[in-house]
Image: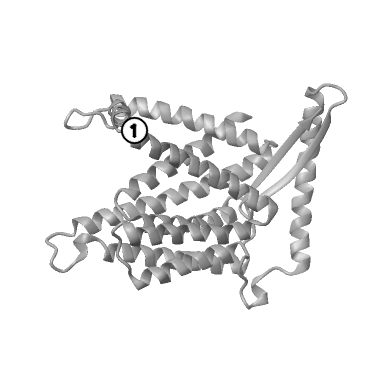
């Protein structure tokens, strides 16, 4: 069953690669803001492939995210060096547009990854820690295979498509690069660990509110030290993206009560989810009891981290 993690791991590798390539063509604040467009694709794919009902407030949130994405992308083109009237060619604007498109395209793969994870975690009875570990192993294998192929592939000038050996030499010659790489890995691990802890102790909505502060921090540092230029439309775009994300996770509610399900409709959805969880728990308990030693106590902990991504954790203690 661990082989089902290969598909989401591939999506993760593709999404990460596209985002980092797009980052080289645009600003850090634009990169961080455009990542919020994942709500747009996740909501659409959840309704299409997972048959999850989207309520009116979901579609209002998706509309806000869509508008914010357009505004942020437009501002990035306005701030491009080649977008001024005296510029000879719009090369810089085209490159920045290309970077924005890559970042948005990466969110499509992130949304696909979330949907695949939800389907397989719920359908295959896979513990969350096992799923995360398997995705990491599959991602490492995929990246190693990809780097070997890119090392032997040649460009028109005869150089490798991606010179991994030269990258290793650069890290050896500049130890600061190793510090940056280690810091990046540590920050991602800490962000995910703290995010899961916050979701488990509080709620996914509260996590989304805190996540918006990350975008503000990147934006502020970019304005202060990164050479970015302030534009009032960025405030509009960021506000729409943050509002859409919080609306989708019900951290902020619309004044119209008709946009939300009634108490009976919510209860019906919870009963359906509970029935699925109980059925999966019974199947998993039978499998573990068949493979475990006698007098083994099993504990099951349901953990659903957000409306579009479910997690299942299993603990076996003697």
Position of residue 271 in the picture relative to residue 170 (left or right): right
Q: Which quadrant of the rendered structure holds the N terminus? A: top right
Judged left or right of residue 184, residue 207 is right
Mark 1 crowd level (few <14, some 14–19, many ≥20, 10 Å Cα)? few
Task: Please identify the quarter of the rendering in which residue 294 is found.
Answer: top right
Above or below — where is 138 with respect to 243? above
Image: 274 above or below 246: above
Front residue of 4/48: it is 4
**What's the residue at 13%, 67% (across, down)?**
86
Left or right of residue 235, residue 38 in this image: right
- What is the x, y in percent for residue 43? 55, 57
| Residue found 43% across the figure and 59% down from its top | 33
Percent x, y for residue 154? 24, 28
The answer to which quarter of the image holds residue 229 is bottom left
Q: How is the image coloured?
A: one colour
Q: Secondary structure at mark 1?
A: helix
- Please identify the residue farthest to the top as the structure is shown: 293
Instruction: Tell me where residue 20 sits by quadrant.
Output: top left
Residue at left offset 48%, top offset 36%: 10
Q: How many numbered circles does the render carry?
A: 1
Residue located beneath label 1 in the image:
175
Q: Quadrant of the C terminus?
A: top right
Which residue is pictured at 21% across the width and 60% down the height?
81
Where's residue 74, x and y in %?
33, 65
Q: Is residue 260 above or below residue 224?
A: below
């Amino acid at each position: 069953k661990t082989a089902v993690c290969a598909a989401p791991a591939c999506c993760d590798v593709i999404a990460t690669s596209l985002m980092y390539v797009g980052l080289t063509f645009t600003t850090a604040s634009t990169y961080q803001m455009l990542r919020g467009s994942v709500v747009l694709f996740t909501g659409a794919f959840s309704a299409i492939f997972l048959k999850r009902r989207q309520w009116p407030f979901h579609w209002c949130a998706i509309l806000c995210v869509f508008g914010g994405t357009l505004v942020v992308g437009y501002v990035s083109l306005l701030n491009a060096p080649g977008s001024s009237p005296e510029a000879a060619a719009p090369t810089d604007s085209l490159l920045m547009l290309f970077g924005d498109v890559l970042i948005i395209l990466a969110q499509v793969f992130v949304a696909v990854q979330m949907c695949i994870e939800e389907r397989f975690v719920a359908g295959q009875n896979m513990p969350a820690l096992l799923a995360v570990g398997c995705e990491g192993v599959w991602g490492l294998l995929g990246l190693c295979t990809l780097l070997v192929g890119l090392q032997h592939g040649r460009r028109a000038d005869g150089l490798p498509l991606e010179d991994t050996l030269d990258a290793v030499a650069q890290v050896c010659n500049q130890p600061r690069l190793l510090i940056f790489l280690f810091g990046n890995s540590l920050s991602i691990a800490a962000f995910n660990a703290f995010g899961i802890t916050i979701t488990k102790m509080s709620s996914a909505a509260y996590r989304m509110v805190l996540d918006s502060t990350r975008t503000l921090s990147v934006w502020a540092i970019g304005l202060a030290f990164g050479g970015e230029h302030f534009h009032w439309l960025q405030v509009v775009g960021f506000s729409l993206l943050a509002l859409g994300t919080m609306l989708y996770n019900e951290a902020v509610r619309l004044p119209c009560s008709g946009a939300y399900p009634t108490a009976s409709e919510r209860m019906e959805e919870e009963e359906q989810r509970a029935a699925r969880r109980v059925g999966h728990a019974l199947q998993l308990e039978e499998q573990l009891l068949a493979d475990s030693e006698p007098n083994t106590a099993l504990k099951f902990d349901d953990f659903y981290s957000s409306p579009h991504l479910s997690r299942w954790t299993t603990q076996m203690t003697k």
